[in-house]
Amino acid sequence: MTRAAITAVGRYLPPDRLTNKDLESMVDTTDEWIRTRTGIQERRILRDRGKASAFMGTEAGRQALKKRDMDPADLDVIIVATVTPDMFFPSNACQVQAALGATRAWGFDLSAACSGFVFGLCTAASLIESGRYRSVLLIGSDKMSSITDYTDRNTCVLFGDAAAAVLLEPDDSGHGLLDHVLRCDGEGWEALCMLGGGSLRPPSHETLAKKMHFLHQDGRTVYRFAVSAFADVAEEVMMRNGLTSEDVRYFVPHQANRRIIDAAAQRMGLGADQVMVNIHRYGNTTNATIPLCLCDWESELQKGDNIVLAAFGGGYTWGAGYLKWAYDTPAVRPQGAKPALEQKAARLAVNTI
Ligand code: UT7
């Protein structure tokens, strides 16, 4: 059966850092509280007001395509998972398409809060498995600083801005996304939401005065939900595929809270060397967390590695995927530019690399 394999990854990190020390001067908090309760030490902030999630997503996507030596004009589909699109419409996907020069591609934005990347991965995989599309660029991009209230210590310490992208292509050799479990439960919507700005409460003096254009979170409630839901789906995916903890090379969790990650890893019987954690550097970047991990660990990943990814977020939404990694980084990352014909051949040879 044809599967969808990740064949390249890319990322964009804004240069400006917001450290816990910086936050100490903004709200009533301490570096110690943030580190011990969340594991976060710093996060990136996109300070340029003229740039937002479409820009970051474009840069991440551009990097992924460049690593694969793929001409953007060869791209079939662009999916952007985001809760902070530049505008309600047109979609970020359209902006990315134009900025990249992906002249043949169509695309759309996907809204599933922090689970958007995992939902997007399964959607992208289905498009490829259908046989109709051969390349999908999936981007997770969020400018969380645009919806964060920097006077609210409950939320402002948690989030950061970033984008990361993966390129998906067909694979007939047993690699790629092999299974997934996706869930949502709208009963939990109030615990994590942004109340204002939508069609129910269009922007008004009242929505501004009530700070409805900022993200609202009942942290404790989300925490309780996340601790069990997150590990449930990851374990379900492992069980369904006969994976023991020893079989898993890496668990790639959504990076919302170090304690939630550790609790899930413990339940799954995983050691620290099997869990990707970079929350201390970037905070919670919502749709970018999982692909950012893949970027950070790309050089360590080997063809055939079993990877379990899992996310949870507002909605509630949650889900997990089982991925067999499709490439060894040095093998498909030769130094220097390749001649055009060789590039095309490398693209077509994805299944045999
Ligand atoms: O990706 C989206 C999904 N979201 C999540 O996964 C978030 C899940 N929730 C969490 O990660 C945690 O609940 C938080 C990190 C948000 C909060 O940690 P907590 O251990 O659950 O703390 P809490 O909300 O129960 O608050 C404990 C105390 C409170 O003070 P009182 O009422 O005990 O006096 C808070 O006001 O900590 C206080 N507090 C802070 N203190 C210093 C809350 N935020 C801060 C802060 N600095 N930044």
Image: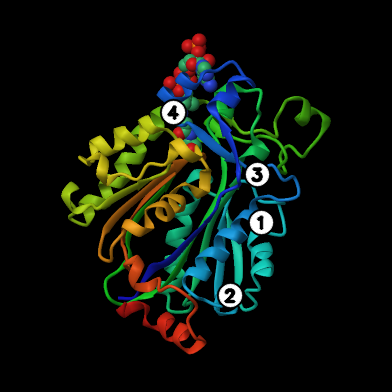
Mark 1 burial class by Cα count in 10 Å: few <14, some 14-19, many 20+ = many
CB atoms at circles 2 and 1 under 8 Å apart? no
Between discs 3 and 2, the one toward the N terminus:
3
Between discs 2 and 4, the one toward the N terminus:
4
Mark 3 burial class by Cα count in 10 Å: few <14, some 14-19, many 20+ = many
Q: Secondary structure at mark 4?
A: helix
What is the three-letter code of the residue carrying label 4? Thr
Measure the C-alpha gap from mark 2 to mark 1: 16 Å
Between discs 1 and 4, the one toward the N terminus:
4
User: Which residue is the site of mark 3?
Assistant: 46
Point out the residue furthest to the top here. Answer: 28
**Residue 121, image x and y in percent?**
44, 59
User: Which residue is the site of mark 2?
Assistant: 72
Between discs 1 and 3, the one toward the N terminus:
3
Foreground: 20 or 103? 20
| Ligand 1 within 8 angstroms of badge 4 C-beta | yes
> Which of the image's four quarters has the C terminus?
bottom left
User: Which residue is the site of mark 4?
Assistant: 38
Q: Secondary structure at mark 1?
A: helix
Q: Which numbered tag is attached to residue 55?
A: 1
Q: Residue at x 37, y 73 (%)?
A: 332
Residue 54 picture quarter: bottom right
Point out the residue furthest to the bottom here. Answer: 341
